[in-house]
Amino acid sequence: MTTDATPEAPDAPPLVPLHCLLRAEAGPPRQAALPTGTPVWVLTRHADVRQALAHPDLGRASLYAPDAPPTVLTPNILDDPSSILNSDGPDHQAIRRTVQRAFTPRAIERWRPWVDGVVRELVDELAASGSPAEVVGALTKPLPVRVISRLMELEGLDTERLGYWSDHALSTTAYSAEEIRTAIAEFGAFGYRLVQERRKNPGEDLVSSLVLAADRTGGMTEEQITSLTIGLVIAGHETTMTSFGNALVYLLDPERAAQAAQAGQAGQPESAGAWQRIGADPAAAAAATEQILRTVPLGDRTTAPGQLRRATADLEIGGVTIPAGAIVAADTTAANADPQVYPPGPLDLFAPLGTPSLTFGAGPHHCLGAWLARMELELGLHHLARVLPELRLATPVDRIEWRTGLLTRSPLRLEVAW
């Protein structure tokens, strides 16, 4: 049984790292088409994307109305109508309230000492294994799995099976529709059993808190509780694993480092010593984390040009009238590079963001786990650079194996040396 999406075919042209992808230029709303052929309005400017993600007349639930046009070619877990992601208005807020207290910045900060300990342990084990080493299996993958397993008390969970479920649940082209439905059904059965178990024997974990809150407030079906539980399991490890692996490719890419050094000589703030600075200064690691999350996307937009919404009424965005029933794609990757918001040219990796990025969305559907993902990436980069200041890629960038055919893309394997 494989636990990772199949890498690109040997005879296929090498994929470029995500930080090298060309982005759509920020401009007025434009019309395009989804892979299904459905027309879509694509938004690329920061102000337009932020407005769309927060607009009450642009929702997710209407994407699954009986009259809605097709938006995906194969099923995935994001298209579960019972998911919190696909509810809007009061229904969405009622579901969100049952879990959001556990993911406030203050709540996340209480976990920092424990997460810090997990990171230190994994980095020390990696260093002790000797150079060269494979960093995905040793660090970027087990870190978020350990964290979410602890928070949800899933110790003993078959991590290979979790990877299998996650890859199928986020598949775009890696698996057939039948394979995806089977895997999601298995994952749903696991989540249902977990919910029933924690209802009978509640503990101090996140699942127990979710179930107790849902039962106390009412209004959530068993299907919704289960969907939220398995969604947290996937989101709790997929985002961090993806962003951590891609961040290492970005920071250790020798060509990018050379360009940064040249820019530094020309008066730009970043230089080839960025990795060492991240290891020496936790504040620098925190600043770099924000810039990396803004700059390096989680996927390559092969299935949709952005986060999809459907208009429930006529509305105006960016000087263009979007008619009721139209599909809108909010391109957060383009918005995160809007030159009207973020300085164009060479990246200052350690500059504070004057305007928050849209990597984790905005408005009522803003990612619940954003602060946890930030913390794990920040601590992971800091301790890895602190312990291994001479870390470098041991495989040329154009020979990196990628996890492909999924909504996200990250290294399947990443050989490093020091």
Image (cartoon, grey):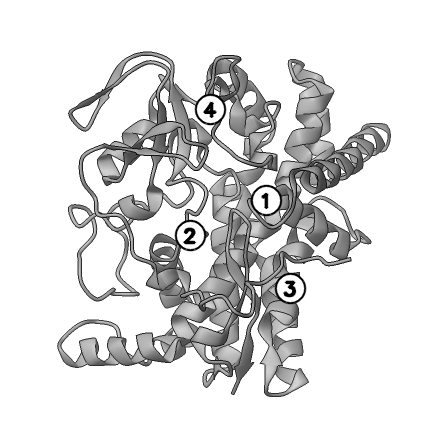
Q: Earlier in the sequence, mark 4 or mark 3?
A: 4
Q: Nearer the viewer, mark 3 or mark 2?
A: 2
Residue appearing at x 34%, y 35% in the figure: 330
Q: CA separation, marks 2 and 4?
A: 21 Å
In the figure, 31 relative to 272: above or below?
above
* SS for callout 1: loop
Do we see residue 213 in this rendering?
A: no
Residue on which disc 1 sits: 170
Residue on which disc 2 sits: 300
Q: Nearer the viewer, mark 1 or mark 3?
A: 1
Residue that extends furthest to the front in the rendered view of this protein: 11
The disc label shown at residue 118, or none: 3
Please state which amino acid type lies under the numbered disc 4: Arg
Q: Earlier in the sequence, mark 2 or mark 4?
A: 4
Q: Residues within 10 Å of mark 3 (few under 14, many from 20)?
A: some
Where is residue 289 shown, x and y percent of the image? Answer: 40, 60
